[in-house]
Amino acid sequence: MSTRAIESPTGSALAGRIGLGRTLTLVARLREVGIVLVLLAVVAIVTIQAPLFFSVSNFEQILLNVSLIAIVAVGQTTVVLTRNVDLSVGSVVGLVAFATGDLLKEHTLGVPAAIGVGCLLGLGLGAFNGLIVAVARVPAIVATLGTLYVYRGLDFIVAGGKQVSAIDLPRDYLGIATSSVLAIPTLIVAAALIALVAAYLLRNSGPGRELYAIGSNPAAAEVVGIPTQRLIFGAFVVCGLCAGIAGVLWGSRFGSVNALAASGLELQVIAAVVVGGVNIFGGSGTVIGAVLGAILLATIENALRILHLSEFWLLAIDGAIILLAVGTDAAIRGYFQRILMRTGRR
Amino acid sequence: MSLRSLALFRRWETLLVVLLVAFIVLGSSLSPYFVSGSNFSNLTSNLMEKAIMALPLALIIIAGEIDLSVESMLGLASALLGFTYALGWPLWLDIPLVLFVGAMGGLLNGVLVTRVGLPSLVVTLGTLALYRGLASVVLGPRSVSGWPEWFTNFGFSNVPGTLIPWPLLVFAALAIAFLFVLHRTWIGRQIYAIGKNKEAARYSGIDVAKVKTYLFIFSGVLSALAGVILTARFSSARADNGQGFVLDVVTSVLLGGVNIFGGEGTIVGVVLAIFVIGVLRNGLTLADVSPDTQSVAVGALLILSVAGPTLVRRISAAWPRRQLTKPVSNS
Amino acid sequence: MRWRRCSQFAMAGMAILVVAACGGSSGGGGGASPATLNIAFLPKAVNNPYFDVAASGGQEAATALNGQFKQVGPSEATGAAQIPFIQTLTQQSVSAIVVSADDPDAIAPALKQAMAKGIKVVGYDSSPAKDARNVFINQADSKGIGVVQVQMVCDEIPGCAGEIAVLSATSTATNQNAWIQAMKDELASNSKYSALKLVKVAYGNDDPQVSTTEAQALLTSYPNLKGIISPTTVGISAAAQVLEQTGKAGKVQLTGLGTPNLMRKYVKDGTCKEFALWNVKDLGYLAYYTAALLVQGKIKGNPGEKFTAGRLGDYTIDPNGVVLLGPPFVFKADNIDQLNF
């Protein structure tokens, strides 16, 4: 019992003292505030160098670019909270994007039906991941590394070397990405809605809080009677659904889809999630944090372009940020643990 | 190792040999060009970089960690080699430099995992991106060619008079060395011990951090070596060399019978698995199946290679037999 | 038990070597006999509509000549990605490889190995290194292609003055680089364009998504941009899409190289007033035909040789081993409906 308390992440250790709900809130708020501060700092620095950075249209571009990643990040957060990871999200987005585009191109289905099918496809792919992880008990790294390639390969088979171009797609569909709701682009509204709904459910619903418990201490969660495998399966289904939604919107945003769409997206999403304060060990972190992390990374990417710096730095920066973020989190955790040990909590 | 798991291994490696033969048969039925000396020679030479990276990765996974950054270190090595060569530096200077950078990259992984205590999955995901990104920064989108003939011959050609590609000699030497170290020396026993139970290993006096760090360093060096060989084989240094290799390398190790949770696995199994995947890919390629489509098969193999033994373990654990050692949960 | 494992290893190793020895060093035979035409197209990437059109031309020639046609290629346009395909084709002993090079030097060693085996190599669209191919079919004079694009952007921009940018394919592509160099030379030397300033060459890698983000980045980073030249079909359609989405169509002019089917909508609504290309199908047809003639020994690929390429007529190989298809064709609203590809 005592060794468990020290080994488990900060969240649950603190939770013992001031209650789970308030602990999550406290840690989450700290992290979110931190990201916003860094974001403001970046904006300030870049604006001084290049004033045209600070404009509504530019910020709109940033948020539009973020919206799809943010949606996927919401799903990824759900999975990471349970101490798993889904590396296949890029392939899911790509496969759904092409399938949806193809259905529309061949006029097989109307726009709403195609969107529905796309989302269902994402859900199904996520469910398959969930099966492998929760039922066959294959570790998530391995399972989703495998499905990353399986789904992408299926994408290539389905695509058969063809692509879907903007001229093949119906006006209504393309219009989703350019339309607005009350002067805010639809994509941004959609992403914000999904994030808020997910944040609410994770914080306030039974299954949501149980996800945190599973991530904090899977063995204890089992003992307490939480249906861990079922919930983990559910988390992967949600992740697949989010990736599916992003895939459906992908064609609208970019106009052209080929079998390579969204390659490498998983790295960006994990970077966003990790920067956003979601603990890779599971058990703590928020969807809002992940979204803020995605915004921060997209802002940095945009800044690089505005400052005419080489885009080749982007990937290296993403990698360095992942390392920095996780390292900082570990340092903070270690700090809290030392405090707790000193206060005699055994 | 308990008697029961030993029996499992004997079955597993036999299974691999069966798979290998099955894929050879499949390959020959798909294309008349499959069964030929020159094809096997090509197939082998295409495999060597991944094979070289799989050896240290096997040890790392046995020790309970993972290293996803191998393909990016390969790319970084290739980019650096090209960059320095284009500057006019001679190869006898560039290659050791590149290997040194590989060691440093591995050291970074090792330090982050052992000193800072970060999970190796995330660290090596980060360095997967970081090293590939650095490769792009170093070389940009260009490629460097114009290598000396001895260099390209080494990567591309066979030992004169035979069908043996030069890199196969390198790999064979490494494989034998790894086989010896893992199965015959106390270092190998330490690695198994760490993989089975990190805490028990530490309490019995093993310097877990040092062993793991060295394993990561080796992984970095050998990935860099693979990068040099790939550059020689393609006659072209590029920042995107090696992209996508990590699937085959990880699959080779896991398919080879190495337990993803650590503590079990053999070099023989890994070598067999390397060729199983190589033969499968080659057979499909000759049948004009695109590499991306082939990845469906390899991805499925990866999942099955872990799901299979896991299920077998669950079944045999459920068997009502007296167990010699209680399975201890690894993190 | 260790010996058991070692012996299994030895068994497997020996099995491989034995099969290899039995297979002999023949490696599946040398080049195909002159009568069979088994020609493979290896474009920069297979996801590209431009190359699909060329492939249809190749297929047409194959049918006319009673030969075989197939197209293989990587999904991503990188030089290194083409190498395994060249090796496979070599292993399969095709009669000829018709290749559009992403990186002229990277694929040279593999092509030379193919040629050493008796396989003919014909470059099309983008040439491999000169000593790694027998003949190169150039769609049009490289200088001419560059010049016409500068001309078009000048025609489109009011006053022919302001900042322009180029959205290219991959940075190593021989053809785009040759055209961009021709553009730069033309901008520098011709006083008509003295008020035009090339501020950036961006690379979309012939990937729709990358091209889209690069196009967006151009618009954001260079707010005074007056024109974009995109000498690649994937790039120009991505740029057109972006201009329409951001509402900049008409304010920032667009031109370059594109296929009529992809660009028809944009030409008619004014986003892209004119663009150029050539008959891509004919390019594929000519490439296949030339390869076939080489395989059959009817031409050797030497400078000065003349030959007739089926329905396209007579061609001569120039001193650099290059065959020119013809001049570029400018598409505008009044003629875009003429061609369907």
Image (cartoon, coloured by chain):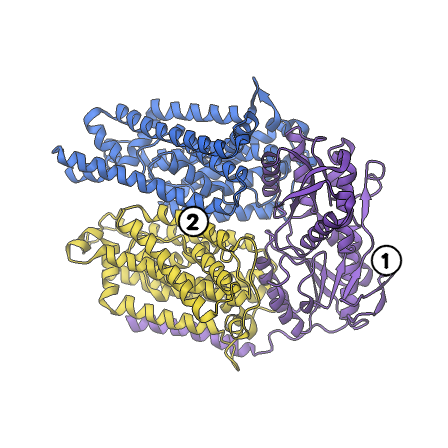
Chain colours: A blue, B yellow, C purple
Q: Secondary structure at mark 2?
A: helix
Identify the residue at horizontal 35%, vertical 72% (top origin). Answer: B176
Q: Residue at x 76, y 58 (%)?
A: C138
Mark 2 neighbour class, 10 Å CA radius: few under 14, some 14 to 19, many 20 or more: many
Horizontally, residue C284 falls left or right of residue C222, namely right
Task: Report, in whole angstroms, how far the alpha carbon at label 2 lies from the one at label 1.
Answer: 52 Å
- Which quarter of the figure is the N terminus of chain B placed in? bottom left
**Tag count in the figure?**
2
Vertical placement of residue A151 versus C309, above or below? above
Q: Chain of mark 2?
A: B
- Crowding near the residue tagged with mark 1, few <14, some 14–19, many ≥20 C-alpha atoms within 10 Å: few
Work out whether residue A242 can be spotted.
Answer: no
Q: Which mark is residue A222?
A: none
Instruction: Tell me the subunit letter for badge 1.
Output: C
Viewer-proximal residue among B87 and C268: B87
Q: Name which quarter of the figure residue C69 lies in.
A: bottom right
Q: Position of residue B298 (x, y in %)?
A: 48, 55
Q: Nearer the viewer, residue C247 or A68?
A: C247
Please tell me whether mark 1 sits on a helix, a strand or a loop: helix
Q: Residue furthest top?
A: A182
Q: Callout 2, which amino acid?
A: Leu
- Most distant residue in the left direction: A344
The answer as to whether the residues below labels 2 and 1 share one chain is no
Q: Is residue C107 visible?
A: yes
Q: Is residue A293 left or right of residue B140?
A: left
Q: Where's residue C157, x and y in %?
A: 75, 35
Q: Give the percent coordinates (x, y) of residue A60.
A: 54, 27
Label 1 is placed on what type of residue? Leu
Residue marked by disc 1: C312
Q: Nearer the viewer, residue B153 or C2?
A: B153
- Residue A30: image quadrant is top left
Q: Which residue is mark 2?
A: B130
